Amino acid sequence: MVRIMGKFTQLRDASRKLQLLKANQRDLALNILADLIHEHSPSLINASELDLKENGESMTNANRARLILDSKKISQLVLGIRQVAKLSDPVGKTLDATVLDENLLLTKVSVPLGVLGVIFESRADVAPQIISLALRTANGVVMKAGSESKHVNSEYQKILIELSTSLEFLPNDWCQIYHQREIVKEMLAATEEIDLIIPRGSYELVKSVSENTKIPVLGHAAGVCHLYIHQSADLEKALNILFDAKLQYSAACNAIETVLIDNSLATTFIPKLITLAKERALELRGDEEFCKYDPSAIQIKSDAWNQEYGDAILAVKVVKDHNQAIEHINKYGSHHTDAIVAKSESAINTFLNRVDSANVYSNCSTRFADGFRYGFGAEIGISTGRIHARGPVGIDGLMTYKYILEGDGQIVADYVGEDAKAFLHLRKTVE
Amino acid sequence: MVRIMGKFTQLRDASRKLQLLKANQRDLALNILADLIHEHSPSLINASELDLKENGESMTNANRARLILDSKKISQLVLGIRQVAKLSDPVGKTLDATVLDENLLLTKVSVPLGVLGVIFESRADVAPQIISLALRTANGVVMKAGSESKHVNSEYQKILIELSTSLEFLPNDWCQIYHQREIVKEMLAATEEIDLIIPRGSYELVKSVSENTKIPVLGHAAGVCHLYIHQSADLEKALNILFDAKLQYSAACNAIETVLIDNSLATTFIPKLITLAKERALELRGDEEFCKYDPSAIQIKSDAWNQEYGDAILAVKVVKDHNQAIEHINKYGSHHTDAIVAKSESAINTFLNRVDSANVYSNCSTRFADGFRYGFGAEIGISTGRIHARGPVGIDGLMTYKYILEGDGQIVADYVGEDAKAFLHLRKTVE
């Protein structure tokens, strides 16, 4: 991999140049990127095989699967980039306009965040997704990929160089890929050069990144999600949603870890749940009440309700009412995604209002919490933070804004004191 | 001052309760707060006199002025709170709505950030402004006031208790005021309890806070603002703007520190500037070129262009063109507020596009960078960060959002794999 000297300082300049391109130039760059990845399929597949050969043996199946790049995955990648190319360009949009006074117009205009720092574990298909999102939003980007995927990421770096060479208008070095471990420390210390750090991977990665940088971090804490079965619930829907939310992909951060069951439903619902869980190889654990129905189940201690299993294990708790359910979720949850199953409109509204999470649902699976399912067209990650962006984050989360004020000589002294001129503050409609 | 035990943990609960109030309940609380401050005028004035008596002697005039609370300042405070009461309530607004599929509606709804931590130096009129903004946005708030203003801030704490007592619906302890220095350390460590730290005061305060917390900080770095006089400038307007931007209030963060003058204007503009600066007691410093016109002026070394004087001192630099001016601003500025004076449309557009600051202006004073002048109705501060909020920050900067998804039993398994249902992703118009 080409290690570029001067590194991060060039990214800021490059990102400022990207921002000045026309939207159709960014469209073109995205489509040529898609073409190049398609053309490089054979060498990408070879590189991924080499990564697998060198590192695969000691890996779990899931991690090995992440290193594989086959023609099907490449087709998906290419399709994804072409879709990003079709997304409306987010740069330079007028978000707001106010006439402060005659010939004094204030506009709020969208601009890129600047430079992104993305850190991800060994995966063969993350880099092109990041590259396309950064290009669409005119952000510079430095990436640190897991070292086990170094061959495939070196191929992407070559493609990037080819892209910059073939399009004269594209600045050099707007996007850099590294795999050396030392670079992480440099990235986390680059408070002047990098505006946002995006760790993509396990909760441990997100946590360790957050603890070691002064740069804002966009990521999610543990995904301790809940499903609450209200006394008014349709039990068939409840079970259907429960198994989807837990087992459709149990390692996902939006899979549930705990189901809260209204006391009045316990005798009918719990035995059904136990039977179905056995059939589907789902391990149930629970509170004292639940263990009366399943004495062999592990009983959960009161301080262990915030555990993320990320596996086919589900905690079951019987709650005396709505209030207890909401309080449990706000106390033990990670404010990611929580759902209620209920027919009662008022129970649903109370839940949606009072549960303090990024995503709150009624009568559907928590697994819908995802940028693609939300229709964002692309996703950079999911945020459980409350600042800047919350929930699934699409291209909007990679933008900020600036205020432009255009006058014809106005000074502030005329607007203060005894004979002060008054501001008009006329809000103009935009688009 | 009443020191409440349990402290910050109660704030989160209280903020969740605030959020559930109706908008007109928050309106009412704001108006009663204004009434109470008006009624307490005599004791507030007494308290401020006591603060002044105990601490005023060793203070500068400017700092002493900040401790004073007279009936005029109180009237302004009361008026300000009544204006905040009239601002449209920002809680629970539908920001976006998308039909994901039949009977599966996604809405994005505004919610408060949660709990704010505000740290400010000794001032007699900051607390009520913060209290009213927090109440309007339904955020809990903990404040650390400078210890020299402890008597007046104790009065505000009493008013808060009276407010909560007179309005049964208002949660206790949603707002806390401290003046003990130790509390700062506790606030900066409260990553679970406080969502946003807002330091209001000097750059040193902002810097020291940012360096000592993992909580996101909203504030501004040094205010190194620029005025660029393009060769097409109207020189009379340029001088008028220059003196307003520098001297109208030279300690403000949006006052300019440097003026960049196009080479072609140097011989006509600089002598005029020197004459006027003498009349108005403005000290000029400059580059080598400038010092040819004023040999007694201090010459600025190349690495000292990022200095914030915050006083009646202005740095002057002659630039050879537009590019050099923009590059100087992007390199040495603090990305706060920068302005061009020019008649050329293309010069203006290039400047507005390429200068990478929160506020970029043409033909008006940088001193307009302010939430009130922008028409926000209230201001919590100015941000030079790029994440979450940028430039002057009004009540919008104290809000976040959550996603609500309402279904009738939908599960994700139906939307993946071979016979996957397709999402509709129909964007609905809101308001």
Image (cartoon, coloured by chain):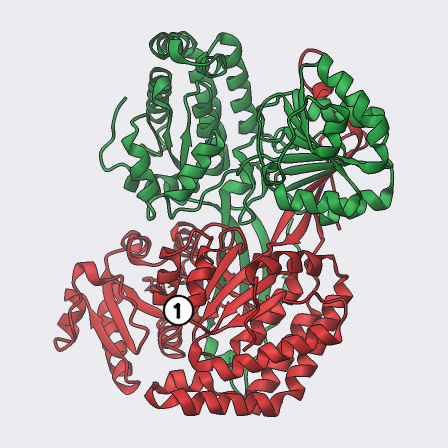
Chain colours: A red, B green
Residue B10 shown left or right of residue A101 in the figure: left
Placement of A322 over or under B130, stated as above or below: below
Residue A414 sits above or below residue B219 on the image: above
The chain that hosts pointer 1 is A
Q: Position of residue A129 (x, y in %)?
A: 57, 73
Q: Residue at x 75, y 61 (%)?
A: A21
User: Is the residue marked by circle 1 packed among few (<14), some (14-19), or many (20+) residues within 10 Å?
Assistant: many
Q: Depth check: A37 or B177 in front?
A: A37
* Residue A373 place in picture, x, y as percent: 54, 70
**Residue A221 seen from this side:** no
Side of B388 where B296 appears, left or right? right
B425 to the left or right of B238:
left
**Mark 1 residue type:** Cys
- Picture layout, residue B127 above or below residue A233: above
Nearer to us in this view, A315 or B334 = B334
Residue visible at 45% across and 43% down in the picture: B217
Residue corresponding to mark 1: A253
Residue B300: which quarter of the image?
Answer: top right
Displayed quadrant of residue A104: top right
